[in-house]
Amino acid sequence: MRNALFTDEFFAGLESSVREVNAAETLPPICYTSPEFFAFEKEAIFYREWLCVGREAWVRKPGDYFTTAHAGEPLVILRDGEGVVKAFSPVCRHRAALVAEGHGNARSFQCPYHHWTYGLDGHLIGAPAMERACDFDRRRVRLHEFRLETWLGFIFVNFDPAAAPLAPRLGAVTKALENYDIATADERAEPSELRAEPWNWKVRYENSNDGYHANRLHAGPVHDCCPSSLATFPELPADTAGYFRYNGTTHADCSFNPTLKAILPIFPRLTIEDRSRFIFLCVPPSLTFSARCDVMNFNIFHVDGPEQISSRRGYLVAPGAMKDPLFEEKLGLNVGTSAIINQQDRMIDRLVQTGLRSKFAVRGRYSWQEESQRELNLWLVQRYRAAWERMRG
Ligand code: FES
Ligand SMILES: [Fe+2]
């Protein structure tokens, strides 16, 4: 059965997932469970696309660094001595131990195994007892460096040195977020903990991307102020690298806390229209984002395996909001209210992943409220198709 995956028929069958939403069907369940399909996705997507790794705010000063991984590839992100943010593989050029873990500030990275030491520019600056090694020029040894771009303070890396730049394809989403003026927003200066999640990355992504479930799974006094019926899906350029939908709210200045009204300061440049809707935004395959009038929440996903991801959450608030002595208490009310919603989402991700493993799982159909899923399918299927063409030669 497995070999049926990599056939012209299988890839031709994916076309039904990119029809207009009322005629489209979901991707085959095997795309969410198969180790072989995940290996294919690494080639089709994760080794070629821009992957979000974190925020520039996490590396504010020279020497600040944090580590992460995508598709099993360890990464260290740092700000070098000249103030430039860079991404390296922390895999030691001696015998492959990782030279950095966690986050912090460093003037250099010394490998814990045999003490080879690398500067913030990735060059090997020290290697004990290597003077007898033939043809070994320390100056030619360097940690592998990856392409890096930033967008609205988000750091993206790409394993493909020939990848097309990301920012020119994010014009539509940048415009949608313009009034939030993210460059001036307050945020934490360090990464949150990575949280392991035992499901396929698309299960998580599609859940974040799904307005259809908003007042079904999350039915109740909180989420009902952002009903599924008020979702709209703006037309986006064909080559867009990011997607968004607006979701109207039942009252202005709505937010997720026990008052259902903003209790943190409202982003100062928002219009009345902005204050009457939420924005849900994604940059596949690793960033999703929601914007309300007083808090923006982001999620960064890292794929670890066919049914394993890890994620980091973070938030942005209006300039000066964190100076309020009661900020943590007010944020806590938002976090506490959202925690119930997040728990429901995690419960459903688990149920979906279990269902997708069933031999009785089928390709389903979409509601008009799931246009975002079909947009993700468009993004995916063109990349699957291109990778299949390359594989066939
Ligand atoms: S593995 Fe890093 S110094 Fe030996
Ligand atoms: Fe949800």
Image (cartoon, rainbow, N blue to C red):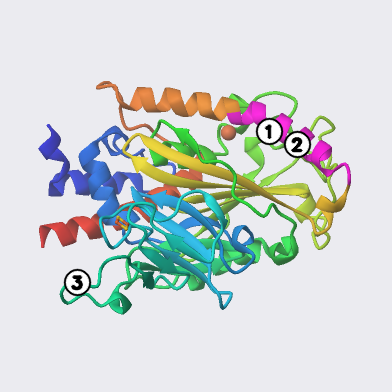
Residue 97 at x, y percent in the picture: 32, 52
**In the image: residue 120, left or right of residue 353:** right
Closer to us: mark 1 or mark 3? 3
Disc 3 crowd rating (10 Å Cα; few below 14, some 14-19, many 20+) is few
Disc 1 crowd rating (10 Å Cα; few below 14, some 14-19, many 20+) is some
Q: Residue furthest right?
A: 325
| Front position in the image: 268 or 215 | 268
Q: Quadrant of ligand 2?
A: top right
Is residue 228 covered in magenta? no
Where 333 falls versus 304 (above or below)? Answer: above
Query: In the drawing, what numbered circle is on residue 132?
Result: 3
| Quarter of the image that includes the N terminus | top left
Query: In the drawing, what numbered circle is on residue 338?
Result: 1
| Front position in the image: 87 or 287 | 87
Dot 3 amino acid type: Arg
How many discs mark residues in the rendered view? 3
Q: Quadrant of residue 319?
A: bottom right
Give the distance between the C-alpha atoms of the residues marked 1 and 3, in whole angstroms.
60 Å
Region of the chain picked out in magenta, as a range:
325-342
Disc 2 crowd rating (10 Å Cα; few below 14, some 14-19, many 20+) is many
User: Which residue is found at the position 56% from the left and 78% from the top?
Assistant: 82
Dot 2 amino acid type: Asn
Q: In terms of sequence position, does the residue under pointer 2 or pointer 3 come before the other?
A: 3
Q: Are marks 2 and 3 in contact (CB under 8 Å)?
A: no
Q: In terms of sequence position, does the residue under pointer 1 or pointer 3 come before the other?
A: 3
Q: Is residue 88 visible?
A: yes
